[in-house]
Image (cartoon, helix red, strand yellow):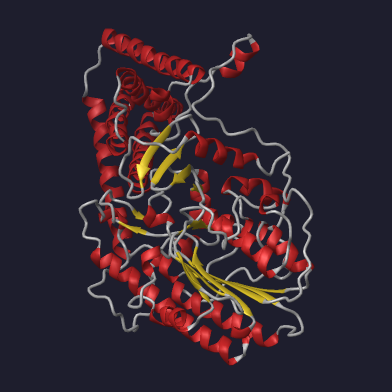
Amino acid sequence: MNVKNILIFCLFEFLFWCLLSLSYFLISGFYPSLLGTLFTALFIPGNCLMFAAGLLVVLLLLRLIGPRTAVWGAVVLGTLFNLIFLLDVFIYSQYRFHLSLAMLQLFFGPAGREIFLFPTSMYLLGALSAAAVGCSTWGLTKLARQTPWKGKTAAVLALVLLFVFAGYNAMYAWGKFMAVPAILTQATYLPWAQPLSMNRRLRKMGFEPKSLPYTIPRSGALNYPLAAMQCAPTEKPNILLILIDSWRADGFTPQIMPHLYTAYKDDSDVFYFTNHLSGGNATEAGVFSLMYSMPYSYWDAVTGAKVRPVLMEELDNQGYTFGIYASSRLNSPEFNQNVFSHIPDLRISSDGDTKWERDVDAQKDFLDFLDTRDKSKPFFGFLFYDAAHGQDFPPDYATPFVPYADQMNYLLLTKNTDPLPYMNRYKNSLHYIDSLLGDLFAQLAQRGLDKNTIIIVTGDHGQEINDTRHNFWGHNSNFAKYQTHVPLLIWWPSKEGGEKNYRTSHYDIVPALMRHALQCVNPASDYSSGMDLFDPTERSWTLIMSYTNKAIREKQIISVLNNYGGMTNYDEDFNPSKTSVSAKALGESLREFSHFYD
């Protein structure tokens, strides 16, 4: 394989990646303006050219070793590049984000085998697809060696590509300086795009870039809480927080969760919040918003400083003992570095090969904790069930919802896939968790703890199962109600319960506990982005975050913000909307990102 063959091979790969890049725009939509179309036409080849140039450099270095080395290098590296692009398109089509180092760390991290459960058929199909891509890439190397090459044509092509690359970067630099949404919004569509920005250099030259349509306030030193807590409890009730991973709002019915539903109907001290939102559409953001009562954007700041939530700090100050029992690992995500960072000998993981087995183990260990703890002290318990996250249950479990599918083979799912068998499997997993909760509530009553324990049952986020027929399966892909609306039930002894239909969110739970359970008189704004859960005052907006994006929900409108100045609007079923949240809601919510910084 000579230099000419390598150049042709890289050109073939470049053209293939350009065609593949169209998939991202078919998924997200083309920007409907002449300016947006022009940038798209430059963006696709300009971005792909960077990868083609990298491949070219490596292959030319391998050619110095020998022609056969260059051939095998082209096959191996070309296959690897193609597989990465194809995998990223697949991920983007279902979740609207790209492959990243954070995702790879999560996949290959200590909890990877617990979080990502794939059937054998998916691995087989993946292996066959990889083999097909490898054979196709090998065919490209042969075609490259047989394709005629003319020096004049090569020179013209090189000039055209150079012009495209320069035009793409110049247009983006201008678009960022002038804050042009038609350009900035598209910057997140393609994977690993790093276009040129000259704002810093232009500032040094005395030019001030135009303000973005919205700006996130600059952060400083973390200042959380804003004031010392002032609490004087007369009683110290036990508090038990039960989380069900991926529990969507319509998953709480007498058919799906008969034990929990019966307990709710039979007790007069139960509050059911029917219109409750998580602060995130994934576990990190959902749990963080609940425990810290502030947006997930503060994750890095509190994790780096190992600042625990105000709630956990005050519980410790008031002499509570802690029983933390999660089915999934607490070091992936790193809740051991923030939420539970100051708990000695923290139980990191549960025993078991499957999610349902680890759920059983977590509950068993929690019940053991109840029997062995210092009973002269109140306790804070944390139970986190994971079976619904993987739609898991024992193989011999009497499943009420049929027919149900095997575990999801994500490679075969499309927007036209019938969701019913997968929904039935999901419901069966919730039904199984409910059987564990039935036993747990019976055990609490047997120990007399139902009389002096506040019990909170909710989900970290929801779970979408192709409800909108947009090919969304799971979570962390959009902010529609299926991924963000979760049940919330609270057993609160001595309080008269009832159904609450006003909008609430995870940010409101801690203020309720701080005020009514721990008797703290501080205003919620000292430590929270929410308000007292029992205050029916209208919440004009709610912040919801994913790993990559942030959204503001005002009534039924959801405005999604990216990091480039773009804002897209949807209704709660994730249909595009021409209406955005109000300027007031936008301004107030964005200020919350700097509320706890100096």
Residue at 76%, 71% in the rendered image: 233
Q: Residue furthest bottom?
A: 446
- Residue 253 vertical position relative to residue 23 in the rendered view, above or below: below
Work out whether residue 345 or residue 148 is closer to the camera in this orientation and state it.
345
The residue lying at 45 percent from left, 72 percent from top is 355
Residue 206: percent from the left, percent from the top?
63, 9
Q: How many labels does the image show?
A: 0
Q: Looking at the picture, how far across and down is residue 363, in whole percent?
A: 55, 80
Q: In this view, does 429 lie to the left or right of 286?
A: left
Instruction: Looking at the picture, tell me which residue is in the foreground, 81 or 344.
Output: 344
Q: Decide: is 238 above or below 306.
A: below
Residue 395: x and y in percent read 34, 80
Q: Quadrant of the N terminus?
A: top left
Q: Position of residue 439 (x, y in %)?
A: 49, 86
Q: Quadrant of the C terminus?
A: top right
Q: Which residue is drawn at 47% across and 23% down?
A: 195
Horizontally, residue 4 falls left or right of residue 112, namely left
Name which quarter of the figure residue 462 lies in.
bottom left
Q: In this view, does 389 lie above or below 221?
A: below
Q: Is residue 2 something one can see in this rendering?
A: no
Does the rendering let one see residue 405?
yes
Q: Is residue 120 left or right of residue 97?
A: left
In the picture shown, does residue 76 fall above or below 208?
below
